[in-house]
Amino acid sequence: MERILFGDNQFFGVNHMSEDKARAQAMQFRDTPSIMRVLDCAYDHGIKVFMCTTHDRVGEIADTVRRNSRRYPDFQFYPCMPYAHKYADSVSEVGIIDTIRRFAPGGIMETLIKGAISAATQNVYKLMEILVDAEMKRFAGVRTPIIFLQNVVTDLLLGLKVYDVFAAFSEHIQRKYDAEAGFITMNLPMLVNALEQVGIENPIVCANINKIGFRMCGGIDAYRKRLRSQRCRAIAMSVFASGAIPPEEAIEWVCNLEGVESIVFGASSPRNVRHTKELIERAWGHGPAPAAAV
Amino acid sequence: MGIAYERTASTPDDSADTARGGGPTSPPIRVGLIGVGKMGISHCAILGAHPRVAIAGICDSATYIASALRKHTGTDTFHDYRKMIDSAGLDCVFVATPTSTHFDAATCALERGLHVFVEKPLCLDPVDSMRLADLAKRRSRANQVGYHHRFIATFRETRRLVQAGAIGEVYHISGSAFGAVVVRPKSGRTWRARKSEGGGCLHDYASHVVDLMNFIVGPPERVLGAHLRRIYSKDVEDAVYATFRYPGGASGQLETNWSDNSYRKMSTTMAVYGTRGKIVADRQECKIYLRSGAEFEQYPAGWTIRYITDLQPPVAYYLRGEEYSAQIDAFIDAVERGTAEHENSFASACETDRVIDLISKAGQ
């Protein structure tokens, strides 16, 4: 797993601190070339991984990378699925069954529904696979060594206690895409326990890890304990807590936390990409080694 | 001319609502879910992660989610909520069915002595809402409605400051919500697209805004005018614009639109104007402006911005937003205390339903 990853919130109007900033960023990144300019900068500074939601626009970025394989020989995507708002709004609009019909590739859902409604309703695994495959279509021909379940879905399944779906997701990702499954969560300690229960040892988990404990459910101490115990490979996100912590202080804290393997961050300008990467490298340069092998 | 509040400074952290009655050895609260659609499934997950709750039954008229949950979690499932209420040994129910069915389900549960959480809005007819509020009070059962915006700390701080008189006499409040739910013609095949079942932007988006405005400054006495506008839907409105008048003469304006593609998700904003300053709040920020000489507690004159990262108390389990877990924590707490007196009760939701009804009539 790469240690420094580039995130995508800033490209799609996601800002947990300010709706004004989110709107300004949505305007700044109104088209794919404006996103590529920042991604190119990150890539040229040695950040080879783009960890991104399966937003429609990401399909265009994958197309660009695919078409220009000489320009991006080492570019990797870590897709995070699904883009939840697409599904949530659709469920409000047309209901659960029609949402599945809308996003699953043509015919498969129809066959399931027409064939036997009970088969479709009971076979959650099959449905999961269909939806994953639909989301993965846009990444055909590009490298996707780790494929994540978004936190809305991870945490929903966690609360519902349908842990077996985590195992099914993991197996499907490995079997079909020769990739490893990752799980984004706001509830890391609870999730790691659940994943262990279904036999997923030392999972890749991506969670908010920041000095002020923002959206670290279970509390900072429980996070420290899990990270130190080497029971997961952790990717820290939201390390700045959406801007609530000054960059130097935020990076120094997270880089010195035992058991954090990777950091994902987003930036809107080449200057911030460079600055944040330098801060991380400097902090890791004289911080403790990560808990597990990279 | 407006809504007068006496300035009463207090410590900033009196909004937390986290007292707990049940100890670790108490038996878990047994919950039944009526309706596991979009909101029901979210409640189901939050309740499933709650350390003092056991999900004892799930009821849905459609088999899809219920049967999958039965298969994967072993939870008992029902087609008829009456059967579940009679046989599952419940302490409380969560009603997350179309609004038109809330009254019957909540009445049935209350009459059998259960505590009841109902999704918003409470009822389509404010007379029914009143009857439910009376019934819950007579039975001393916890009775909460899912206006989760009241558990977002930026809005709680807005209310606290307004009611403490920090911005002086309130002369105007503006509430808005925008989002992208219905964004194309001919869409909408669920109950949310049918007026008779409680669909439409008024009962969906605008109800949150009305409730939040009520939370911050109290309910208006009149709706002076309203415009319910269809954009894409056939049977329901997609946007609601209304003007309120409050006791004391303050004015209010509501603007909601669920067909606005420029929003990634529902975005709710409150702006409150007073003689000493103003507050603009959304779910991320609470921006406070105080006039020179109107400093209050730690807030100096001029602008202060407080962020959600600083204001929101943590929750034990997170799904979609702290407010969803916080409202359920508050309800479970009320169940454990066996009280009908708590935040977001049927009584306060009645006021919201009354205003919704006034908007509906003014918009005809």
Image: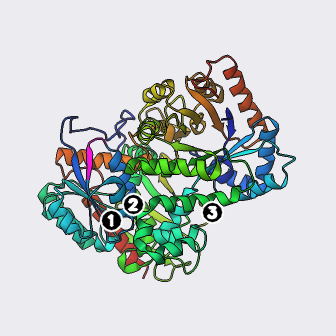
Magenta range is B51-55
Could you tell me which chain the residue with mark 2 belongs to? B
The reply to whether dot 1 and dot 2 touch (C-beta < 8 Å) is: yes
| Residue drawn where x is 32% and y is 44% of the image | B50
Quadrant in which residue A64 is drawn: bottom right
- Amino acid type indicated by mark 3: Ser
**Marks 3 and 1, the one that precedes in the sequence:** 1
The reply to whether dot 2 and dot 3 touch (C-beta < 8 Å) is: no
Q: Position of residue B126 (x, y in %)?
A: 28, 71
Marking on residue B35: 1
| Vertical position of residue B364 compared to residue A269: above or below | below
| Residue drawn where x is 46% and y is 37% of the image | A192
Work out how far the residue at label 3 is from the one at label 1, CA to CA, in angstroms: 31 Å
Q: Residue furthest front?
A: A175
Q: Which residue is mark 2?
A: B39
Is residue A33 visible in this depiction of the protein?
Answer: no
Q: Residue furthest right?
A: A70
Q: Which residue is mark 3?
A: B262
Badge 2 element: helix
Badge 3 element: loop
- Magenta region includes residue B220: no
Depth check, front residue: B162 or A204 = A204
